[in-house]
Image: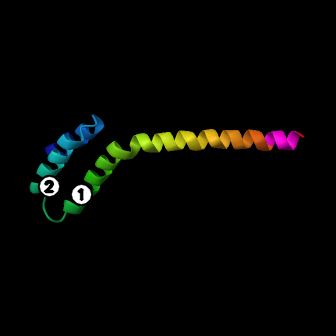
Amino acid sequence: MGYISKAIALCGKKQVRDANRAFDLASTFTDPKTIHLLFLIKVGGIFLITYYPCLITATRLWHSSMRIDMRTQYAAFES
């Protein structure tokens, strides 16, 4: 449990290599029944570190385009 917590904390600090090592070390002490859960946590953590900034940027762009689209529709409705 300690290595998993350490890996999650390292994910929060955006230290991908150290988090990956901690997850790998945790997998050596994990029984075969719960290894899939550990891999799921690992993939989620590494994915968030890697792609979260891209997701935030895409979401902001989408929201701004929706605002522009709503303004043009409202302006067309007013005419």
Left or right of 59, for residue 69: right
The kind of secondary structure element at disc 2 is helix
**What residue would you read off at disc 2?**
27
Expressed as whole percent of the image width and height from the top left, the position of residue 10 reads: 23, 38
In percent of the image, x 32 and y 51: which residue is there?
44
Residue at the right extreme of this rendering: 79
In the rendered structure, which amino acid carries the disc numbered 1?
A: Phe
Identify which residue, 38 or 74, lies in the foreground.
74
Toward which corner of the image does residue 28 lie, by quadrant?
bottom left
Whichever of callouts 1 and 2 sits on the residue coming sooner in the sequence is 2
Left or right of 71, for residue 63: left
Expressed as whole percent of the image width and height from the top left, the position of residue 11 reads: 27, 40
Which residue range is magenta in the image? 74-78
Callout 2 crowding tier (Cα within 10 Å): few <14, some 14–19, many ≥20: some
Quadrant the C terminus occupies: top right
Badge 1 vs badge 2, beta-carbon distance below 8 Å:
yes
What secondary structure predominates along the stretch shown in magenta?
helix
Residue at the bottom extreme of this rendering: 33
Q: Is residue 1 visible?
A: no
In percent of the image, x 30 and y 47: which residue is there?
45
Residue 39 is tagged as 1
Identify which residue, 23 or 64, lies in the foreground.
64
Count of marks overlaid on the render:
2
In percent of the image, x 66 and y 43: which residue is there?
66
Left or right of 20, for residue 25: left
